[in-house]
Amino acid sequence: MRWFWWLLAYASLGIGIVGIVVPGLPTVPFVLLAAFAAARGSQRLRDWLLAHRQFGPVIRDWEREGAVSRRAKRLAIGMMALCALVMFLTAPKWWMAATGTAIMACVALWLWRRPEPRQ
């Protein structure tokens, strides 16, 4: 089973990195999944993720408190709003954009309700 976790960790990290530049593809959930899988399949990757300047604090806050920083919340919700706008401008049918926007609104509400890390 270790190879499965190893593969999931590296694949999730790869998708998360792609999400940095591809609008609408989230980065943080895939990095969190990579950290979860790396704990079971690649201690070296897990250590690297925890020591990473950008990913480390996000992973530690999530694992310790289930917390998301206010800055991350604002950035995520802003990107969702931008993606909703793009969908409404480009979707062939209005209901397609409305469906995607409704899903993002649910995710945004859930995200905003997450606690913020204690300092």
Image: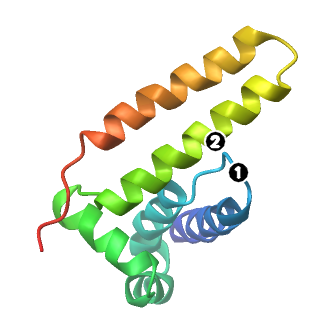
- Residue 55 left/right relative to 21: left
Instruction: Judge whether 107 appears above or below 114 on screen.
Output: above
Instruction: Judge whether 25 appears above or below 104 on screen.
Output: below
Element marked by disc 1: loop
Task: Where is residue 27? Give x, y as percent.
Answer: 56, 60
Which residue: 43% across, 62% down? 32
Name the residue tied to disc 1. Answer: 23
Which residue: 52% across, 65% down? 5
Task: Where is residue 96? Give x, y as percent.
Answer: 73, 16
Name the residue tied to disc 2. Answer: 82
Question: Nearer the observer, disc 2 or disc 1?
Answer: 2
Category of crowding for the residue at label 1, using alpha-carbon neighbours closer than 10 angstroms: few (below 14), some (14–19), many (at least 20): some
- Residue 37 left/right relative to 119: right
Name the residue nearer the viewer: 12 or 106. 106
Task: Where is residue 87? Give x, y as percent.
Answer: 74, 29
Task: Where is residue 118? Give x, y as percent.
Answer: 11, 67
Amino acid type, mark 1? Pro
Q: Which mark is residue 49?
A: none
